[in-house]
Amino acid sequence: MTTTRLIGGLWTGFLVLWWTWALFNKKADRGATWRGRSWTFRLGLLVAIVLVMRLVRRSGLAGWLAVHGPAALLHPAAPWQGIGVAVCVVGFAFAIWARAYLGGNWGIPMSMRQQHDLVTSGPYARVRHPIYSGLVLSGLGTVLALGVLWLPAVVLVGLFFVISAHTEERMLAEHFPEAYPPYKARTRMLIPFVF
């Protein structure tokens, strides 16, 4: 099996598990969602990722970087493929572990559920948004395994997750005014002990 198929299979399996799991969520709290959140925004993010990847591919920049620049270490022919697959698996495992602790409270980014609970155990004991952390880690593993061409997509998705995390934190602080500030003070947003 090629590395591309392996990484594609990991992402496909993860998405199937994720959307199947979503069938068992609590109902959305329509009064506690980000007002600007819409399918248009998500579609715009997807279109931006595709356009940036096409621009990089058509410009020949990805090939040039792989041969001449520091990104040569990330070229698929380098021995980084196995490390990339392992990083991708670790990222998915972290996101799945976090999703298991979140239970029925999980929802699409920047939303809350009815009777939402504040989860502070498991991976949430150190990081406030471990699902985002795990997915970015899987994205970085994809870059290591498949090459620098995937880096713009990972950066754009990472920026979306940072924006989502800030929005969700404002919502959680409003919803849990007593419990959220001390929880936020003792944890990091995305990377344990760092950020």
Image: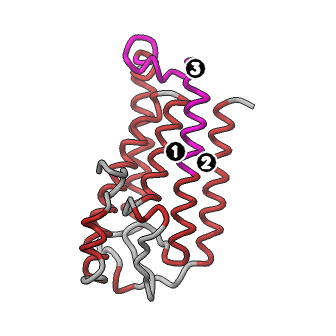
> Of circles 2 and 1, which is in front?
1
Quadrant the N terminus occupies: top right
Nearer to us in this view, 19 or 89: 89
Upstream in sequence: badge 2 or badge 1: 2
Instruction: Indicate which disc residue 138 carries.
Output: 1
Considering only vertical position in the picture, is 161 above or below 19?
above
Instruction: Inspect the image, locate mark 2, and give the three-letter code of the amino acid beneath it.
Output: Trp
Residue 127 is covered by the magenta coloring: no
Magenta span: predominant SS is helix
Q: How packed is label 3: few (under 14 Cα within 10 Å), some, or many (20 or more)?
A: few
Reading the image, the residue beneath label 2 is 11
> Of circles 3 and 2, which is in front?
3
Q: CA distance from mark 1 to mark 3?
A: 18 Å
Q: CA distance from mark 2 to mark 1?
A: 9 Å
Instruction: Inspect the image, locate mark 1, and give the three-letter code of the amino acid beneath it.
Output: Ser
**Which residue is at a point 43% across and 23% down the rendered structure image?**
62
Instruction: Indicate which disc residue 79 carries.
Output: 3
Q: Is residue 184 left or right of residue 108?
A: left
Considering only vertical position in the picture, is 171 above or below 42?
below
- Color theme of the render: secondary structure
Mark 2 secondary-structure assignment:
helix
